[in-house]
Amino acid sequence: MEFGLTDEQRAIRDTVRDFVRKELTPREPAVLARDRRGEPGLTRDELTALQAKARGFGFWGLSTPEEYGGMDLDAVTQALIHTELGRTYVPFTFGGEADNILYEANDAQRAEYLLPTIEGDRISCFAITEPGAGSDAANIRLAARRDGDDWLLSGEKTFITGGNDADFAIVIALTDPAAGARGGSTAFLVDRSMGWRSSPIVTMGPAEPASLFFDQVRVPSSHVLGEVGQGWQLAMRWIGRGRYLIPARAVGIAERALSMAVEYANTRETFGAPIAANQAIQWMIADSELELEAARLLVLRAAWLVDSGADARHAASMAKLSGATMVNRVIDRVLQVHGGMGYTRELPIERWYREVRLFRIFEGTDEMQRLILARDLLRGYTKVGLG
């Protein structure tokens, strides 16, 4: 079994690492200061400028097909990049990306939505979660009913990432209540100018999702994404894509935080000796390293399965569950190693503490991942062991 990276993967990883060190890490003090004031870590203009700088040396559209000007990178390389970005708490993402299901757009929709989104001229959000349909996504109630050649959308979506900034939403709506969400939902491309409004939701972390409100919002039939009744399949494809990238970023966060704990343990003295001499500290560091490396391998295996063309859903669920729980435990230990200083807002540890708690909730809670893993084994969809 080969665990080594290709020369290209290593070069890309090192380029991103250098970009993080030179362009993002120097911004960290300002990001912490803004966090203390309740402000975003980067303004929209700052993010756009950084993305343009990265585009200048070829980093644009990591997963975007080459025909649209992207890099079309393999899954393992994308996972490596997300790990490197996780090592800084500056909220940066490379530009040139669009929701994976937007590629189902027809020619007119590509010109109006897909291409401007890739270029950064338009901002999208994906809207499926509702007040009564979180983990139980099949329980969506936002309705779309025909009115001549149009559809009228009524209902609410909640906890929508990017919903406050988006100028259009990919909305999964119920078009055939009798068939239920799995057979009777449809994806719509809905401009904000059509009449929906958003309201920010204040959270314990830096994320600020939105609630979206639709009151008889009129949407032309030409704005159906894919086919009528195909909404569930598109939604599951959208959700599934992130399940190995989220824990990849968790690995990067844990790497940086654990490195801080090691350095602090070797320099902080109590009772005349570094706290690293204490077995309690050593065990926290050892457990963190063990769990971090286990999560890394699960992430890379899931990405490798994606690249091999195999069904990676089970492996991605294992990676998501492992990475999300691991990073929460590691940050908790790192805060404990730092003692009172870890609890202050002078260091990024408490910020991470708030941020990574979300990893166990969004894009599939811990409980849903466990349900998937158990179901796959009990119903014979997968077998115990790598074979």
Image: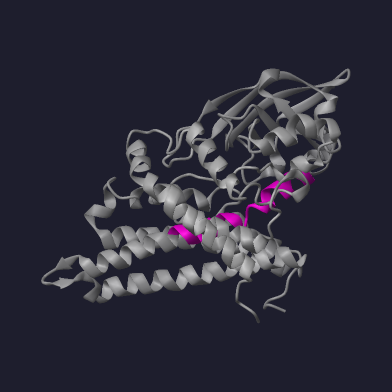
Residue at horizontal 70 percent and vertical 36 percent from the top: 140
Q: Is residue 150 above or below residue 130?
A: above
Left or right placement of residue 306 versus residue 359 in this view: right
- Tell which of 299 and 68 is nearer to you: 68
Which residue lies most toward the right here? 148
Which residue lies most toward the front here? 56
Q: Magenta residues?
A: 232-253
The quarter in which the C terminus is drawn is bottom right
- Tell which of 9 and 346 is nearer to you: 9
Q: In this view, does 99 lie above or below 324?
A: above
Which residue lies most toward the bottom here? 1
Residue 51 drawn at (x, y percent): 55, 42
Tell me, yes or no, whether the highlighted magenta stretch contains residue 335: no
- Tell which of 299 and 53 is nearer to you: 53
Residue 183 drawn at (x, y percent): 83, 42
Residue 113 drawn at (x, y percent): 74, 32
Q: In this view, does 231 lie above or below 374?
A: above
Residue 103 drawn at (x, y percent): 78, 42
The quarter in which the N terminus is drawn is bottom right
Left or right placement of residue 49 versus residue 156 in this view: left
